[in-house]
Image (cartoon, rainbow, N blue to C red):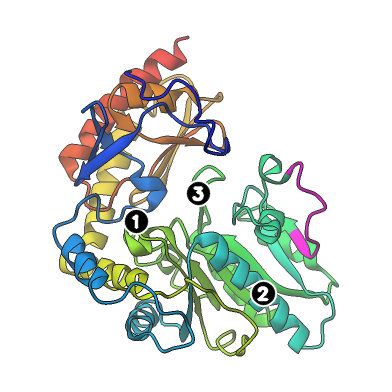
């Protein structure tokens, strides 16, 4: 692989383990680096570039918005907020929306809603149930809710008020919260992303919804990575036929523009009052236009169905071509959010794949993560597997 940089720039804080390439342009599901080398984008900006790159409907809309307004602040009404909120309410069956700039901010707001919900009920020290292997962000609070020591080690003391349980075990959550009057909410990802593409089972989600109703807890579902059509439904929890009380969104909602949202149902919709929370940039006109156009284009172009059908094809092809290789433990996920778990750490595959012209990531040390744009074609899905298979074979043979 032709390297763009041999070492980290002394002027940029060294917080990322970067692949030594620099990308300059993209078209559809492909991007090109400064040397003209092409890559098939199996990562989609980490589940962000919903519409791929340089989408012919999105780009003119954003260009137009740049000529109108970029930012005004939330001292004033922002018409785009009303339009995007109305659409998210329609798609989710929930009630209202708060806009921010990222998944971390959306999750932080969800934690604040849960705490205020508890305090309003007279609970002095509210507690939130969270999950093993979860990832909710890198602020002090969201990091404390995260279940990965690599994320929070070295940043103590952590924020108190979280009860941690394993996924897909209703008996475990009942046991962990037995006799605890301070629990106010359950907070989880429908499919854990950074934790290794770990799905919550539909029957577990239904049992959890019932438990939250019985105990007057908020069900807070982090759909930052698995939402906005990625699994073939607007939101991944909809496969289980449930509706949460709080739903953080971000990543794919703006097709690359920084955006975050917290969608609230009736139980949580009026918890925050003026002065309780806010954001300088959140809900700015440019980000709102990106969200509005993303959802409109997804509907017009049938991208939920595409995510479901192409995702099912990609998963089946991965299972056929990789699933039986010695060292491959499992292919899992739904739609265009898929993981291939190996029996050993495989981080070296990120750079090797880039060398072969494929962008992907490795999460939870040993899970190859594929979250490509939702415009991916069957032919491109086949190309992903064709590029990936020899790399995995060679790696497992080492």
Report the residue marked by disc 3: 193
* Magenta segment: 153-163
Who comes first in sequence, dot 3 or dot 2? 2
User: Is residue 84 inside the magenta stretch?
Assistant: no
> For the point 47% across and 32% down, which residue is it?
18
Quadrant in the picture for the N terminus: top left
Q: Main secondary structure of the magenta part?
A: loop
Can residue 184 be seen here? The reply is yes
Q: Name the side, left or right, on which 333 lies relative to 304.
A: right
Where residue 160 sits: x, y (%)?
Answer: 81, 62
Where residue 185 sits: x, y (%)?
Answer: 68, 73
Q: Residue furthest top?
A: 398
User: Is residue 155 inside the magenta stretch?
Assistant: yes
Q: Which SS class for mark 1?
A: loop
Asked if residue 42 is positioned above or below residue 282 in the image, the reply reads above
Task: Answer with the quarter of the image where residue 230 lies.
Answer: bottom left
Where residue 63 sits: x, y (%)?
Answer: 21, 65
Q: CA distance from mark 3 to mark 1?
A: 18 Å
> For the point 56% across and 23% down, which residue is it?
344
Asked if residue 149 is positioned above or below residue 67 in the image, the reply reads above
Report the residue marked by disc 2: 112
Report the residue marked by disc 1: 256
């Amino acid at each position: 692989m032709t390297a763009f940089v041999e070492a980290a720039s002394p002027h940029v804080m060294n917080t990322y383990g970067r692949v030594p390439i620099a990308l300059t342009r993209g078209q559809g599901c492909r991007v090109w680096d400064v040397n003209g080398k092409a890559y098939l984008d199996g990562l989609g900006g980490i589940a962000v570039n919903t519409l791929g790159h340089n989408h012919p409907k999105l780009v003119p809309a954003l260009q137009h918005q740049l000529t109108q307004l970029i930012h005004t602040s939330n001292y004033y009404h922002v018409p785009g907020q009303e339009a995007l909120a109305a659409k998210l309410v329609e798609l989710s069956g929930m009630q209202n929306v708060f806009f921010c700039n990222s998944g971390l901010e959306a999750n932080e707001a969800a934690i604040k809603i849960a705490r205020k919900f508890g305090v309003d009920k007279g609970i002095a020290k509210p507690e939130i149930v969270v999950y093993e292997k979860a990832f909710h962000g890198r602020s002090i609070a969201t990091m404390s809710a995260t279940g990965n020591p690599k994320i929070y080690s070295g940043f103590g003391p952590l924020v108190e008020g979280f009860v941690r349980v394993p996924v897909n075990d209703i008996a475990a959550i009942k046991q962990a919260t037995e006799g605890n009057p301070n629990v106010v909410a359950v907070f989880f990802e429908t499919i854990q992303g950074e934790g290794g593409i770990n799905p919550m089972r539909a029957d577990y989600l239904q049992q959890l919804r019932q438990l939250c109703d019985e105990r007057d807890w908020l069900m807070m579902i982090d759909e930052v990575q698995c939402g906005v059509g990625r699994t073939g439904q607007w939101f991944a929890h909809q496969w289980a036929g449930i509706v949460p009380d709080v739903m953080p969104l971000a990543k794919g909602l703006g097709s690359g523009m920084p955006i975050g949202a917290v969608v609230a149902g009736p139980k949580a919709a009026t918890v925050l009052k003026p002065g309780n929370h806010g954001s300088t940039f959140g809900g700015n006109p440019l980000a709102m236009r990106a969200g509005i156009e993303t959802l409109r284009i997804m509907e017009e172009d049938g991208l939920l169905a595409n995510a479901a059908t192409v995702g099912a094809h990609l998963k089946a092809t991965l299972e056929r071509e990789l699933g039986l290789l010695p060292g491959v433990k499992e292919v899992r996920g739904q739609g265009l959010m898929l993981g291939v778990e190996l029996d050993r750490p495989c981080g070296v595959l990120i750079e090797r794949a880039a060398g072969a012209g494929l962008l992907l990531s490795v999460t939870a040390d040993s899970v190859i993560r594929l979250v490509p744009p939702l415009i991916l074609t069957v032919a491109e899905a086949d190309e992903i597997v064709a590029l990936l298979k020899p790399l995995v074979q060679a790696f497992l043979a080492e």
